[in-house]
Image (cartoon, rainbow, N blue to C red):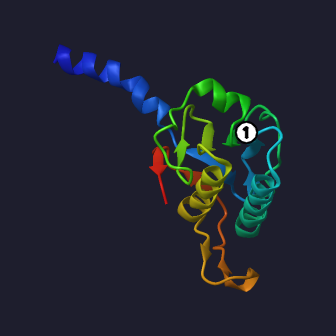
């Protein structure tokens, strides 16, 4: 019995860190997007599309910020100062690869070893957690489901499309 209690106490922090991250709650923003400084146009445009698709889905306009105000989560896209401080190992990913990580209960990180990889991670995020589908080129070919809330399960993703 004591062994089980000790195991539960040791494992509790690991389970606490794996909390889901809510980015939109009941049609209201619950997060901000933090974009890497001096992001190339390609990545800045992808983030603008991310904002537009999340707003189209939920009605919530996620703002760009350098840090989240109290009570809001952060979605870091690219090599922000916070992401660089994490020391993520990306060297073994090809240029199109990316990771989606959850280093804190209120933080999502989307980053690849290149800007292309980060962009692929951003679109994977939209498909996986928002439900966006690109069925054919053009705005009429983009399916965006109507949702009131978006909660992201804190399960790390590592992919090379």
Q: Is residue 18 above or below residue 143?
A: above
For label 1, count other residues whose C-alpha is less than 10 Å away and answer few (under 14), some (14-19) or many (20+): some
Task: Identify the residue at horizontal 54%, vertical 46% (top origin).
Answer: 100
Q: Is residue 70 above or below residue 98?
A: above
Q: Is residue 129 above or below residue 133?
A: above
- Residue 61, given in percent of the width and then of the height, sits at 81, 57
Left or right, 46 with reference to 147 = right
**Which image quadrant for residue 133?**
bottom right
Q: How many marks?
A: 1
Pick the front one: 85 or 66:
85
**Which image quadrant for residue 122?**
bottom right
What residue is disc 1 on? 72
**Which image quadrant for residue 147?**
bottom right
Task: Identify the residue at horizontal 26%, vertical 15% (top origin).
Answer: 6
Pick the front one: 120 or 23:
120
- Residue 143, given in percent of the width and then of the height, sits at 64, 78
Residue at the left extreme?
1
Q: Element under label 1? A: loop
Q: Is residue 141 above or below residue 95?
A: below
Left or right, 122 with reference to 51 = left
Pick the front one: 7 or 144:
144
- Residue 52, given in percent of the width and then of the height, sits at 78, 64
- Residue 112, given in percent of the width and then of the height, sits at 59, 45
| Image quarter in which the N terminus is found | top left
Left or right, 45 with reference to 118 = right
Task: Identify the residue at horizontal 65%, vertical 29% (top origin).
Answer: 84
């Amino acid at each position: 019995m004591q062994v089980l209690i000790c195991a539960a106490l040791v494992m509790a922090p690991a389970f606490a860190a794996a909390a889901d991250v809510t980015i939109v709650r009941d049609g209201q923003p619950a997060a901000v997007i933090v974009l890497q400084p001096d992001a190339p146009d390609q990545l800045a445009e992808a983030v603008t599309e991310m904002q537009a698709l999340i707003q189209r889905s939920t009605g919530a306009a996620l703002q760009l910020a350098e840090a989240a105000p109290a009570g809001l989560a952060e979605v870091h896209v690219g090599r922000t100062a916070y992401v660089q401080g994490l020391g993520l190992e990306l060297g073994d990913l090809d240029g199109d690869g990316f990771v989606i990580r959850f280093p804190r209960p209120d933080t999502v990180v989307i980053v690849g070893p290149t800007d292309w990889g980060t962009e692929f991670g951003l679109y994977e995020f939209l498909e996986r957690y928002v439900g966006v589908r690109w069925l054919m080129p053009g705005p009429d070919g983009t399916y965006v489901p109507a949702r009131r809330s978006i909660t992201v399960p804190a399960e790390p993703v590592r992919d090379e499309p």
